Image (cartoon, rainbow, N blue to C red):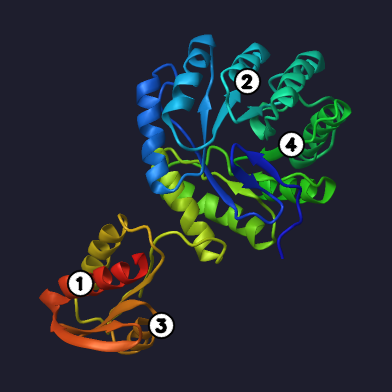
Amino acid sequence: MRRSSRQIHIGPVAVGGGAPIVVQSMTSTDTRDAAATVAQVRELEEWGCEIVRVAVPDREAADQLRAIKAGINIPLVADIHFDYHLALQALAAGVDGLRLNPGNIRDPEKVKQVVVAAKERGVPIRIGVNAGSLPERQAGDERSTAERMVALALEQVRLLESLDFDLIKLSLKAFDVPTTVEAYRRMAAAVPYPLHLGITEAGTPRTGIIRSSVGLGILLHEGIGDTIRVSLTAPPREEVRVAYEILKSLDLREHGPILISCPTCGRVEIDLMGLAERVDDALQGIRVPLKVAVMGCVVNGPGEAREADVGIAGGKGRGIVFRHGQVVRTVAEDELYEALMDEIRTVVNELER
């Protein structure tokens, strides 16, 4: 069961309160280059990104926010560190949300000015705590890193609440999965606000996907989390793709195809790995939800293929093609890919009608 959280809106996108878990990403372009940033956001939109965040390191970047906002179709969040003036400038430019790191803006009076301006405009603020930017540990402080993260976040929550501001979203990110999980569990029990999940600085896709999938998977399975970002050292579209795969694996969202393929063994008598890779690549351009099975032998193949919308079960140099549980035809191995793609196109056309 999902944790019950208060609902807020980032632009038109509902976050928390039982709304579908929202997929976010962050641009890797120089925000001062509005055209390049808009182009990347539009690519992210095509991949299903629902909220996008941009870095705002200086006034020149902040000056471009209005143009970026005008050129995109999804809510825009300004990521602010150190200089509260940039947050005020971003609000004036019409952004849909702010991310503030309390570890980097520590003067309550400066935070208050931002909160007052955000309240006037009805713009939510994410209190984004990172383990790497916590204040220096004081002598005798034996709290865990997760406990210190939660304490800092709660300090900011109380400040915002004291100003009668409750358009709050929270994140507590660390590279270390156990620390991140502990922090989110503690925060989920302490406040009703929606939580944005992420494993920060997760790394390259080879290891970052695993780290993110483990950490986010644990929390999502426990019902914790209202939005997610998969942080990877990779093009941002990969973050969106992986985020949806994590959500689909837990039956939390539908978005594009699910590929089922067996791990191969000595019973396989077709080039299963080559075929599965070709099919996986071809499925990337499809946005409707469907299950595709690419199976290599007669042990689990027919059963899995029948359960999928479209599937094949390989034999010696040939394979059986299924659609909606029914055998459509048997074809030679060198015809399997095209036969399967023909059936996929048929099902996609059915679903798009």
Residue placed under numbered mark 1 in the picture: 342
Q: Are marks 2 and 3 in contact (CB under 8 Å)?
A: no
Give the amino acid at mark 2: Leu
Locate residue 329, reporting x and y percent: 19, 87
Q: Residues within 10 Å of mark 4 (few under 14, many from 20)?
A: many
Label number found at residue 168: 4
Question: Disc 1 or 3, which lies upstream in sequence?
Answer: 3
Rounded to the nearest angstrom, the CA distance separating label 1 from label 3 is 18 Å
Viewer can see residue 213: yes
Give the amino acid at mark 3: Glu
Q: Give the vertical position of 289 relative to 239 (above or below).
A: below
Give the amino acid at mark 4: Ile
Q: Nearer the viewer, mark 2 or mark 4?
A: 2
Q: Which of 220 and 7 is in front in this view?
A: 7
Rounded to the nearest angstrom, the CA distance separating label 3 from label 4 is 43 Å
Badge 1 element: helix
Locate residue 82, reporting x and y percent: 65, 16
Label number found at residue 91: 2
Rounded to the nearest angstrom, the CA distance separating label 2 from label 4 is 15 Å
Tell me: 53 left or right of 310.
right
Q: Which of the 4 image quarters holds residue 328?
A: bottom left
Image quadrant where one finds the N terminus: bottom right
Question: Disc 4 or 1, which lies upstream in sequence?
Answer: 4
Tell me: 200 left or right of 275.
right
Rounded to the nearest angstrom, the CA distance separating label 2 from label 3 is 50 Å
